[in-house]
Image: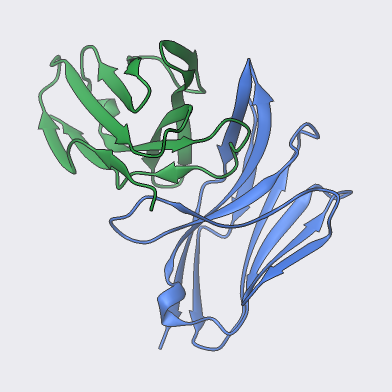
Amino acid sequence: QQQVKQSPQSLIVQKGGISIINCAYENTAFDYFPWYQQFPGKGPALLIAIRPDVSEKKEGRFTISFNKSAKQFSLHIMDSQPGDSATYFCAANYRGGSARQLTFGSGTQLTVLP
Amino acid sequence: DVKVTQSSRYLVKRTGEKVFLECVQDMDHENMFWYRQDPGLGLRLIYFSYDVKMKEKGDIPEGYSVSREKKERFSLILESASTNQTSMYLCASTWTGRTAEQFFGPGTRLTVL
């Protein structure tokens, strides 16, 4: 079974600090790595994504770092704000059966204190 | 603005009942997905459909079935609900070739008593 391992399960950060969430995978067939953000009472929404041939991607305060040799990738949230408080899921895209699928990590509940 | 709607936000059913969860998207997406979300387990794929009347099992299809008679509608069916199916159910959709960018509904929290 395809797996993506995510840590930590929960994270508390002070306003202005850096939030870091880590993910690791085993299957080299994964070929695209999105991150999703979920606010309470809402469905997840795509936040940022990276291809394995790129080591870093930055969008505003959000950065993905990708280490292909270590099969690890991480989300960094710079200058974390209380509005960033949400659950974050890493994911990996692969072809399963006749169509492509996403496999998700277990999620990280981020709380940013004011 | 993409919209994925789910028929109920909260649902309470009894063990053994047949349960229908419906999902409708308005963006002409070819692909639709059903996930269940449980604390500490993330999102797990139950079934997906890449075309009308086409379906494929995900990682945890046991105890579930699906139906897609129209492009915009994807239904999840629990033939005989059990307490271990108490969960949050999320529907998602996207275009062919854009699997990494899925649009999710708000979810249905199902409680089976």
For residue A57, above or below residue A68: below
Residue situated in front as seen by the camera: A106 or A95: A95
Question: What count of labels does the image hold?
Answer: 0
Question: Which quadrant would residue A113 be assigned to in this image?
Answer: bottom left
Residue at image point 11% right, 34% down:
B12
Quarter of image, res A7: bottom right
Chain A: drawing colour: blue
Residue located farthest toward the right when viewing the structure as drawn: A69
Q: Which residue is drawn at 51% across and 79% down?
A: A13
Name above or below for residue A10 compared with residue B76. Answer: below
The way the protein has been coloured in the rendering is by chain
- Residue A62, horizontal then vertical, whole percent: 62, 71
Residue B82: x percent and y percent? 22, 21
**Does residue A12 appear to the left or right of B99 in the view shown?**
left
Q: In this view, does A22 lie above or below B76?
A: below
What is the quadrant of residue B64 in the picture?
top left
Q: In this view, does A40 lie to the left or right of A85?
A: left
Compared with residue B32, is residue B51 higher up or lower down, i.e. above or below? above
Colour for chain B in the figure: green
Would residue A75 appear left or right of A80 to someone viewing this image?
right
Rendering coords of residue A69 (x, y %): 89, 49
Report x, y in % for residue B55. 46, 14
On the picture, is A51 further left or further right than A101? right
Quadrant of image for the C terminus of chain B: top left
Q: Residue at position x 53%, y 35% from top?
A: B95
Query: Which residue does the image show at 74% across and 36% down from the upper left?
Result: A30
